[in-house]
Image (spheres, rainbow, N blue to C red):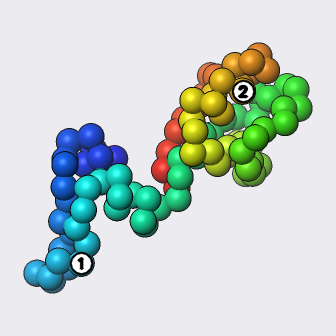
Amino acid sequence: MDEAQYLCEKIVIMDHGKIIEKGNPEKLLKKHFGGPVIKIPNTNLSKKIKFTCPIEIDGNVIKIHCHNIDSAIQELINAGVSLSGLSIERQ
């Protein structure tokens, strides 16, 4: 779906010859998936940061659930957090 988001204007999903979903990639992603998740190693967060987005700690990874990726990354940069090991995924 990640590639389709960039390569396609419309998507049709079929199951056993029947159309079960159709629309533009962004609409389908919003309907069936959560927003983006920024993952960053917990070791990079030497300071406590007050995030404006919900976060969860999953082992040694901090997951930041934020629809505005730019502002979340800017918060990390402003706090002096290393972005080494950062990844962004759809949930």
Q: Residue at x 88, y 32 (%)?
A: 48
Q: Mark 2 vs mark 1: which is more N-terminal?
A: 1
Gap between marks 2 and 1 measured at Cα: 40 Å
Residue topped by disc 1 = 20
Q: Residue at x 24, y 62 (%)?
A: 23
Q: Amino acid at mark 1?
A: Ile
Residue situated furthest left in the rendering:
17
Q: Residues within 10 Å of mark 2 (few under 14, many from 20)?
A: some
Determine the secondary structure under disc 2: helix
Q: Residue at x 48, y 50 (%)?
A: 90
11 horizontally vs 46: left or right: left
Residue topped by disc 2 = 75
From the top left corner, tell me how far across and down residue 28 is, in percent: 34, 61
Which quarter of the picture shows residue 42?
A: top right
Q: Residues within 10 Å of mark 1 (few under 14, many from 20)?
A: few
18 horizontally vs 68: left or right: left
From the top left corner, tell me how far across and down residue 38 is, in percent: 60, 40
From the top left corner, tell me how far across and down residue 19 is, in percent: 17, 77
Q: Amino acid at mark 2?
A: Glu
